[in-house]
Image (spheres, helix red, strand yellow):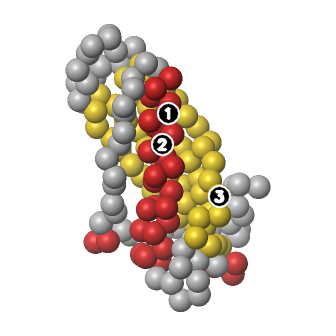
Amino acid sequence: MVELKGYKVNRLEIENKAKPGSQLNLQNNVKYNINYMEADRKCVGFLNLSISDSNQSPFEIRIEAVAEFSYDEGDNKTDIHISSFDQLFPFIRQIVNTAASFTGMPGLLLPIIRLNRDTVRIGGPQQEEPETSPLN
């Protein structure tokens, strides 16, 4: 079972120079990666989210967040990846909503995003040194 232990936002950038009443066609780009600390059955998720107008209006929100999770022995890494994202993303949605409201744009609520099991890729470059939690 995957359990969120904590998260923090490392970067939050907002640009809203769109004219009041402008119609925006927002698109988002989400990247989510995990580094494992297998000896401790912990992992760290790194989420990068950008929201911008597809018509190139001067509106953009960028968030870089990191979260630490624990998991049980024998948990499948694909399941860990999906479950950890599902636990972190609601917090990110709320942060986007709140941040957008500070710019005078109320009601910006991202749709729920579900990761597709078939597109989750496990593996990649090996770390030479053991991973430590960025929350410390």
- The reply to whether callout 1 and callout 3 are in contact (CB within 8 Å) is no
Contact, CB < 8 Å: mark 2 with mark 1? yes
Quarter assignment of residue 15: top left
- Amino acid bearing label 2: Gln
Which amino acid type is shown beneath numbered disc 3? Gly
Mark 1, residues whose alpha carbon is within 10 Å: few (<14), some, or many (≥20)?
some
What's the CA distance linking mark 1 and mark 3?
19 Å
Q: CA distance from mark 2 to mark 3?
A: 16 Å
Helix, strand or loop under label 2: helix
The 10 Å Cα crowd at callout 3, few under 14, some 14 to 19, many 20 or more, is few
Task: Decide if residue 12 is on the left or right side of residue 86.
Answer: right
| Percent of width and height locating residue 107 | 36, 31
Residue extending farthest to the top is 19
Residue labelled with disc 1: 98
Residue 5 picture location, percent across and down: 65, 64
Which mark is first along the chain, 3 or 2? 3
Residue position marked by numbered label 2 in the rendering: 94
